Image: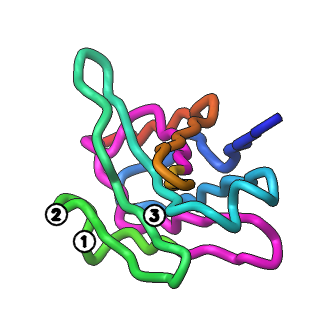
Amino acid sequence: QVQLVESGGGLVQAGGSLRLSCVASGSIFRLSTMGWYHQAPGKQRELVADITLGGSTNYADSVKGRFTLSRDNAKNTMYLQMNSLKPEDTAVYYCNAQFRRFSSRYEYWGQGTQVTVSS
């Protein structure tokens, strides 16, 4: 059974920091591009950042220079270090894993973790 388990969300003041973690089932982690998405109330889910198996990262413009994404392949864990947080970063953050195998595409989601940034 595939599992993505997020942790690290919470309430923080503007300008503060949080680190999100996502632990994935080993077999999936070793195949996948991993990413974080967020969804604010009334808005669509959007990509925050993702990282390939080789460690190449991609960030949304809104978080460039503030957030850092990394993965520890030995621990099947992905981290999102969020610095200089802003109220507009408030959202539920979801861990995502996706990969292709033969002709099929697979995608998995975690349950989400709430991040709230107060002004």
Three-letter amino acid code at disc 3?
A: Met
Q: Which residues are magenta?
A: 70-97
Residue 81 shown in magenta: yes
Callout 1 environment at 10 Å: few (<14), some (14 to 19), or many (20+)?
A: few
Q: Amino acid at mark 2?
A: Asp
Identify the disc placed on residue 64. Answer: 1
Q: What's the amino acid at mark 1? A: Lys
Identity of the residue drawn at 52% across and 84% down: 54
Q: Residue at x 53, y 64 (%)?
A: 80
Question: Mark 3–mark 2 contact, CB under 8 Å?
Answer: no
Q: Residue furthest top?
A: 42
Which residue bears the numbered disc 2?
61
* Cα–Cα span, label 1 and label 2: 5 Å
Q: Residue 41 got which mark? A: none
Secondary structure at numbered mark 1: loop
Q: Residue at the location (35% across, 31% down)?
A: 39
Badge 1 vs badge 2, beta-carbon distance below 8 Å: yes
Foreground label between 3 and 2: 2
Looking at the figure, which quarter contains the C terminus? top left
Residue 109 screen position, x and y as percent: 57, 36
- Helix, strand or loop at label 2? It is helix
Q: Earlier in the sequence, mark 1 or mark 3?
A: 1
Q: Does 19 sit left or right of 119 as displayed?
A: right
In the image, residue 100 above or below residue 112? below
- Which residue, as the protein is rendered here, is positioned at the far front? 103
- Residue picked out by circle 3: 82
| Residue 85: x %, y % from top left | 36, 57
Instruction: Give the number of the mark in front: 1 or 3.
Output: 1
Choose between 69 and 29: the one closer to the eye: 29
Instruction: Give the CA separation, mark 3 to mark 2.
Output: 14 Å
> If the image is split into quadrants, where does the N terminus sit?
top right
Q: Is residue 87 left or right of residue 99?
A: left
